Image (cartoon, helix red, strand yellow):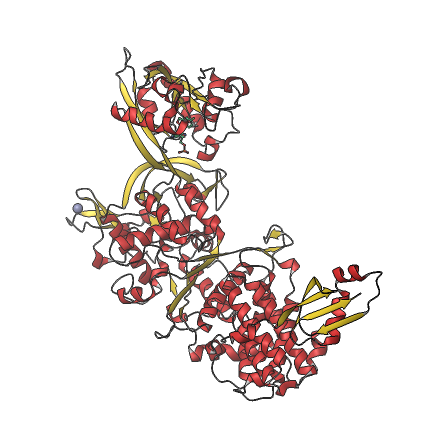
Amino acid sequence: MSAEVETERTENAYDFRAQEAKWRPYWEKTGVYKPTGNAPKGRRYVLDMFPYPSGDLHMGHAEAFAIGDMNARYYKQCGYDVLHPIGWDSFGLPAENAAIKNGTHPKEWTYKNIDTQAESFKRYAIAVDWDRRLHTSDPEYYKWTQWLFEQFYKKGLAYRKDSMVNWCPKDQTVLANEQVVNGACERCGTTVTKKSLNQWYFKITDYAQQLLDDMEQLEGKWPERVLLMQRNWIGRSEGAEVRFEIEATEAQPAESFTVFTTRPDTLYGSTFIVVAADSAFAEQIVAPEQAQALEDYREQIKALSDIDRQSSEREKTGMFTGRYAINPLNGAKLPVWASDYVLADYGTGAIMAVPAHDQRDLDFAKKFDLPIVTVLDVEGAEDPAESGIATAGDGVLINSGELTGLPKAEAIAKATELVESAGTGEGKVIYRLRDWLLSRQRFWGTPIPVIHCEDCGEVLVPEEQLPVLLPDNLRGEQLAPKGQSPLAAADDWAVVPCPQCGKSARRDSDTMDTFVDSSWYFLRYVSPRYADGPFDPQAIREWGAVDMYVGGVEHAILHLLYARFFTKVIRDLGLIEHGEPFKALMNQGQVLNGGKAMSKSLGNGVNLGEQLDQFGVDAVRTTMIFASPPEDDVDWADVSPAGSQKFLARAWRVAQDVTSEPGVDSASGDANLHKLVARTVHDVKQLLDAGKFNVVVAKTMELVNATRKAIDSGAGGADPAVREAAETIAILLSLYAPYTAEDMWHALGHDNPVLTAGFPQVDESLLVDDTVTAIVQIKGKVKARLEVSKDISEVELEKQALEDETIAKLVEGSEIRKVIVRAPKLVNIVI
Ligand code: ANZ
Ligand code: ZN
């Protein structure tokens, strides 16, 4: 039956446009989405990763926010005081590029887009408290980003250093390692080069172990794969540092250096040393006759990313430095090579190569014809020199002096002891995690609140002078990157007196990575207008950490890691008590079209606004929720917003057909429907707690169908159980189809917002199973058991018993003399 035909049965057709026009002002007026400050059940803080203001909302937002909102609405319906805020991550490059192109200031593009998105969010009916709206590009916000930077600085957690950084020649800005994808800029695809620059860093490495340890609190509450990605990113390695001596030559003195190894047990198998070719150390020790070769080699590897350098696919390259080192354990003389497969900034930038047991070293040894010595006897392993495969796995040490005969694990401990007692090494834990490069040479970001004075050096901008405002007078071309921040050229902005000595000095012209802005916004939301600090201490005590955080898995590593780091530092500053920002995390999938991500080049984009115009907000939201479990992708080519609309219309008509008054005793109505309501509420609660939102929609559909049947075939709209079912449907819909739900609720005679109805209580007795086990005997012997209704008739029970497969087979060919039936528990067949 088509929706049109069905609507003719009632005078009032389901009209989503009228509903949208009617209920939006009502919610604004009632303030139902604001926290009340007093809910007996306590508080819940639900947060969706805040949007970036690029154009209007798209299908991805529609999915993410339908899911996030469902969490918030569920808690609210359960009686919690819910904090569910929204804001914008509104600094960043696209605004600046648009401004350069259009001859404007980035704020124009930014705030125009924010207004567009805000309007769409309101239409989309997300249950947020609009009074808490924040924008990271507002001076009231970035003042506190700067203030936090200053606290980090004072703790030694923000510092500057010279380093080789990834540089995008097109965007003219520094990129973090993670913003380089396959050697190209994540944003514009230009091949990234290296450049030596003086840059600001946050010392996130100080928190590496804590970031790992505290993941225990997140176990089972964050998706396992996200925890794994975080763990790998931090990359803890246990091993030892071992000091080697480089022999003096006539031209050069002796040098000592340290290698990091996870396998000190293999010290006797080390046949050469490799230092990172691009390290200062390589330059320092290279023999004079090899210096030119090193320089040439360094030039050749300059543009390679760390990933390329370490790729096992690439043929190994490198050169002999002309020097030799002495193995501290056995005195062996090892040639020192320089190569790109050793990274300058991991471990110590130098390794002891053990070709028999490390594949990279083996590849290198084979290429340059270096010796290979096996020191671990692994059962069944082939000779690496012949097979080309380094021997891994567990085994017993050979050719290793005092280590010979020990199993691997013991040898690792013993070797560490040996170097420790000889004073040439020590056990050591290192991390892959690097400090966070936070400075950007771009305009549209939070200015770094530091002044550089010739006499005083780095001086923090005094707190009372915060915020350091971005200048308003730069536009268009003036914002174009020229190898340094456009702010550096703005003398009227940059030149200021030194806060310490008064001499003319210059502001730091870099701005902060936008990940800084998003590393603490969840703390600001608890008191977004607070003027005396980044947040009101009282409010932060009340709300604490986010109970449920919802967003895309693309943020699995950086944003979440940075936010976790910030939270820990802010805790250590004594400003908050909790050390983890997000107690639970839900990742939504992507919205695809025809199996592929929507994109302009593929021409498979779906316009959200058009979908909303055609099917209505509720149908789009319902489709998003119903299509798949939240974490899975939704393929818009496979779903039916028209079908969702039809379902919503059907649900809505149920409410229109109810003729009883609110408050009737539902137990006096249709018993089956009354039970189904209880069963549905019970199941839905479990599904919501387990995050199986799509099944919640399916359950609502079942209840709608059963209710429709009851209306049409039973006591009709006057039946008290029908009212109960209709109200339950409205409450369930309030989680994902807010307009329809509100309209139903009021049609059912209520005058409070449906979100305050309260999640229904379940009468547990209604869930008790109505079935019993009936025993089927043949000549007094039990042959089968049947699950049957308590109220089954004798005739029906006899029929089911004889139709049972086992029984049917047993009686086949025999004559049934008599069947004795004692419903509902016993059938005895005499043959
Ligand atoms: C000798 C050895 C023998 C190693 C063996 C491994 C196996 P993870 O686990 O990733 O921390 N290494 C150390 N510093 C390096 C650098 N800067 N660039 C490239 N490789 C480096 O790996 C630690 C191991 O990677 C270290 O242990 C070292 O090689 C190498 F059978 O030392 B090993
Ligand atoms: Zn000074």
**421 shown above or below 124:** above
Residue 551 place in picture, x, y as percent? 47, 57
Q: Nearer the viewer, residue 353 or 149?
A: 353
* Residue depicted at 38% across the width and 50% down the height: 216
| Residue 740 in sight here | no
* Residue depicted at 64% across the width and 61% down the height: 639
Residue 449 place in picture, x, y as percent? 27, 52
Q: Nearer the viewer, residue 454 or 695?
A: 695
Which quadrant would the C terminus be assigned to in this image?
bottom right
Residue 538 in the figure: left or right of residue 52: left
Dividing the picture into quarters, in which one does residue 696 lie? bottom right
Residue 214 place in picture, x, y as percent? 35, 50
Task: Name the residue at the left extreme.
Answer: 501
Q: Nearer the viewer, residue 149 or 333?
A: 333
Dividing the picture into quarters, in which one does residue 80 lie? bottom left
Which quadrant would the N terminus be assigned to in this image?
bottom right
* Residue depicted at 47% across the width and 65% down the height: 71
Count of numbered marks: 0
Task: Name the residue at the front extreme.
Answer: 780
**395 shown above or below 146:** above
Residue 552 in the figure: left or right of residue 158: right
Residue 671 place in picture, x, y as percent? 61, 80
| Residue 808 in sight here | yes
**776 shown above or below 708:** above
Q: Nearer the viewer, residue 155 or 725?
A: 725
